[in-house]
């Protein structure tokens, strides 16, 4: 009974956190991370400010929860694992275009919020550096899986991969120029293959 | 005599403006456009604040002068004209990589200052939109010069050209990953040719 009660409470607490994160994400994206107050989030989420303080403590923690939910939604880890199972190098490279597109599609606003937070707050800048570092490490491992099949050395391959998957290109082609997401993904797949494979 | 005196004064006034613009550019880039005061610029440029107010009126006007000096230094217009004189499409496309690289090399800090100013000030945002619009128009004319020699329709060609010349790729490869500028220019030339020509 006590265990059941506890897990019910934990689920409820998580539901509250997600409700706060969802409302905060909209406000951060539309009005800016820096100017958005806990009071404004409280009003938008219809959750008392005191509950938000108890659940998160501060705005960076809310942003971390937004990020966690985004990564879960984009399902990048599973998609990246599936990529590694593909034996054909062209197919494997093309599949990387899929998880990158999925990441941008589900969370380019989250990256922008992080960028704004990092400009305003040195600790958030350090945190974003760590996240980018971890991403780079995963991409380096992904590229290692190609062994001798890449056109360039590991360093240049990674640089080119990062260049092709620059967020601003997604922003430009899909959000500013109106490309369908599938057209962007096809372009990215073709370009990664052309730039990285012999 | 009077004419000579006047042209001497005009030269002196221009020299003062350039001195202010030079000092302001460093402060804007290092400390931020929004937080930099005319008083701080006055101190760094060793020009009385009153003289700066008389010469410029406000910060946006200083930023415009910084931008004008940058464009003059990058010499983009002349380089673009030279491109148009090249008859071989591959050579003409490669030469565009040169003026783009030159623009970034001499003024990526100026673009960043504009971006910050645009985030803080709607009029600066509108001004930046106009500048980008003018750039797009010039690029569209440049691509028109290829007539039937491009791999895609004019719209897609322009989109791809803009994607390849995304400032963030220069930032990534040259400033973050340490590529020599010549290596970036060679990569950009190869990539523009591969993406835009059949």
Image (cartoon, coloured by chain):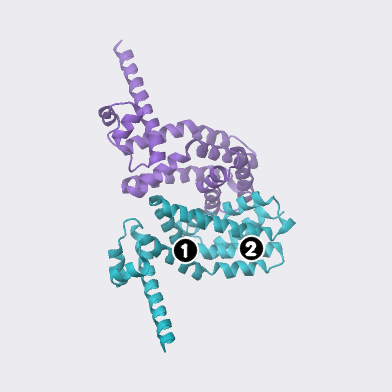
Chain colours: A purple, B cyan
Query: As rendered, which of B168 and B21 lies closer to the eye?
Result: B21
Is residue A68 something one can see in this rendering? yes
Picture residue at 31% right of the left edge, 17% below the top: A6
- Residue A10 % position (x, y): 33, 21
Image-based side of B84 in relation to B120, left or right: right
**In the picture shown, does residue A111 fall above or below B146?**
above
- Quarter where residue B99 is shown: bottom right
Which quarter of the image is occupied by the N terminus of chain A? top left
Disc sitting over residue B117 in the figure:
none
Residue drawn at x 39%, y 47% as measured from the top left: A129
Task: Nearest to the eye among marks 1 and 2: give it.
Answer: 1
N-terminal of the pair, mark 1 or mark 2, is 2
- Residue B180 seen: no
Q: Quadrant of residue A65 in the image?
A: top left
Q: Residue at x 33, y 58 (%)?
A: B31
The picture places residue A115, in percent across and down from the top left corner, at 40, 46
In the rendered structure, the residue with mark 2 lies on which chain?
A: B
- The CA span between labels 1 and 2 is 20 Å
Task: Judge whether A9 appears above or below B42 on screen.
Answer: above
Q: According to the image, label 1 marks what residue?
A: B107
Circle 1/circle 2 CB separation < 8 Å: no
Q: Which residue is mark 2?
A: B94
Image mark 1: chain: B
Classify B187 as above or below A106: below
Residue A133 placed where, x, y %?
Answer: 43, 46
Q: Secondary structure at mark 1?
A: helix
């Amino acid at each position: 009974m006590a265990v059941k009660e506890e897990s019910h409470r934990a689920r409820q607490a998580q539901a509250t956190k997600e409700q706060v994160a969802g409302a905060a994400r909209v406000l951060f994206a539309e009005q800016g991370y820096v100017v958005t107050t806990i009071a404004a989030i409280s009003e938008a989420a219809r959750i008392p400010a005191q509950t938000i303080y108890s659940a998160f403590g501060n705005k960076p923690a809310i942003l971390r929860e937004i990020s966690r939910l985004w990564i879960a939604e984009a399902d990048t880890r599973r998609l990246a694992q599936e990529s590694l199972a593909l034996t054909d190098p062209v197919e494997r490279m093309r599949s990387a275009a899929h998880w990158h597109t999925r990441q941008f599609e589900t969370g380019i606003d989250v990256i922008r919020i992080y960028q704004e937070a990092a400009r305003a707050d040195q600790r958030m800048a350090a945190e974003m550096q760590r996240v980018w570092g971890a991403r780079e490490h995963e991409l380096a491992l992904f590229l290692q899986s190609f062994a001798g099949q890449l056109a360039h050395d590991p360093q240049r391959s990674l640089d080119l991969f990062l260049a092709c998957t620059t967020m601003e290109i997604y922003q430009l082609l899909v959000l500013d120029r109106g490309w369908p997401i599938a057209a962007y993904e096809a372009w990215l797949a073709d370009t990664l293959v052309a730039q990285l494979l012999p």
